[in-house]
Image: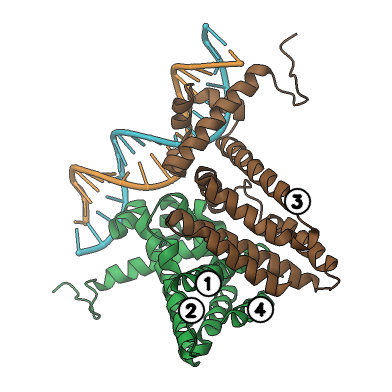
Chain colours: A brown, B green, C cyan, D orange
Amino acid sequence: MPARASESDGLTRIERERRAQIIAATITLVAERGYPAASLSRIAQAAGVAKGTVVYHFTTKDAVLAAAYQQVLTSLVTHVAEQVETVPIRHAPQAYVRAMLEHLTGHPDHARTIVQVGLASAANGGRVRPPSQERWAPLATLLGEAVAASGRTVNTDKLRTLAVLVGGMIDAVVAEFLDDPTYDADAAAEQIVDLLTHEL
Amino acid sequence: MPARASESDGLTRIERERRAQIIAATITLVAERGYPAASLSRIAQAAGVAKGTVVYHFTTKDAVLAAAYQQVLTSLVTHVAEQVETVPIRHAPQAYVRAMLEHLTGHPDHARTIVQVGLASAANGGRVRPPSQERWAPLATLLGEAVAASGRTVNTDKLRTLAVLVGGMIDAVVAEFLDDPTYDADAAAEQIVDLLTHEL
DNA sequence: GTCTATACCGGGATAGAC
DNA sequence: GTCTATCCCGGTATAGAC
């Protein structure tokens, strides 16, 4: 009876421990020293295990980065979902924008990890980061529900584009903030919200 | 008399030829098969020279990518500048947006090269792509002149952010278009222009 | 001045020893 | 389940051929 998992993920206790340990090391490494520093050997060293051990638990380097990415992303998504649910549907998009920027600027290490891994994935043709279409699909849905709640109707294409535009604005503000920590991202968030409110 | 350059760049004829040849091969390679395919050996092979030859003319791989990046970027900047100059200052930002998306969607290979090299540079901490602040500084200037021409005044910070937001929207539309070539980028451009016009 | 061959080091992936 | 040995590939540096 080799230590069955307590949760329904088919992982043993030690497996979950090692994975968590390696993921944590990876996030720190990427956030502090950038993507290029996150080689398998360095990750292994930071986690206190051998290179092969990392590969054993994740089979590939991409999988390690993907796991780290997923972890910080889940934390982001959870936060945004919570915030969005506390407001009426017609104000959901605004809450979405605020929550995104709030979380990202409040956790620069997470933001850096998301950006670094996301960029590297895109540049390497990896599938860690979802394509543009999927990335902003939830926001498009939110926008659709918001206008519907206001009794008006908007062309589906316009909605899709609006989601893309708002998404792009969020990305850009995060990038600017990471480049220049003195940049007032909160004010930028309100500017996006204003723009969005005009549009809805 | 070893073949002085006809132009004032201190390059010999053969140097310019080889560089052009290698840069062209690089652009094609990056656009068609992505950044990871653009290794020195593959670039050399595609250009019909030895690996060392590429290094001889560019000293480093980053330099090759930077040169390719610069070439497509110059073509973009030139086009945008031309378009912007044909309209009165107060409509310059709108012309900027249209020209950017026009060129980028009209030359997907250029767009792909810019995106791929830009992303890789950002992910690798390289200095090929300028930081967010510099990227949209010209647009910010344009926006400032446009509002000034309309007689109104706008806070400098708001202007900076507006430039960042518009820049982000452009990036996002390009990304969406590259993901899905059936996406109507022209319509998206007009949506950005509308949004911008409200704001100015 | 132009180009090639070769060697070095570090990265990721695989096989197999323990 | 963990780790080492090994392999191949990528970028860089050097020596030297023409």
How far is mark 2 from mark 3, CA to CA? 34 Å
Badge 2 sits on which subunit?
B
Q: Earlier in the sequence, mark 2 or mark 1?
A: 2
Q: Which image quadrant is residue A101 in?
A: bottom right
Left or right relative to A153: residue A158: left
Badge 1: few (under 14), some or many (20 or more) residues near its Cα, within 10 Å?
many
| Residue B177 seen in the current view | no
**Residue density around tag 3, few if under 14, some if 14–19, many if 20 or more, within 10 Å:** few
Relative image position of residue B49 (x, y in whole percent): 37, 58
Chain at numbered mark 3: A
Decide which of B30, B141 is in the foreground and name it. Answer: B141
Secondary structure of residue under mark 4: helix
Task: Give the SS element for disc 2.
Answer: loop
Q: Which residue is mark 3?
A: A86
Amino acid beneath label 3: Thr
Q: Are marks 1 and 3 in contact (CB under 8 Å)?
A: no
Q: Secondary structure at mark 1?
A: helix
> Residue A36, image x and y in percent?
44, 43
* Residue where numbered disc 2 is placed: B154
The answer to which of A141 and B72 lies nearer the viewer is A141
Measure the alpha-carbon separation of dots 1 and 3.
Answer: 29 Å
Q: Which residue is mark 4?
A: B186
In this rendered view, identify the residue nearer to me: B71 or A144: A144
Q: Amino acid at mark 1?
A: Leu
Mark 2 and 1 residues: CB-CB less than 8 Å, in contact?
Answer: yes
Q: Which mark is residue B162?
A: 1
Amino acid type at image mark 2: Val
Q: Chain of mark 4?
A: B
What's the residue type where badge 4 is placed? Answer: Asp
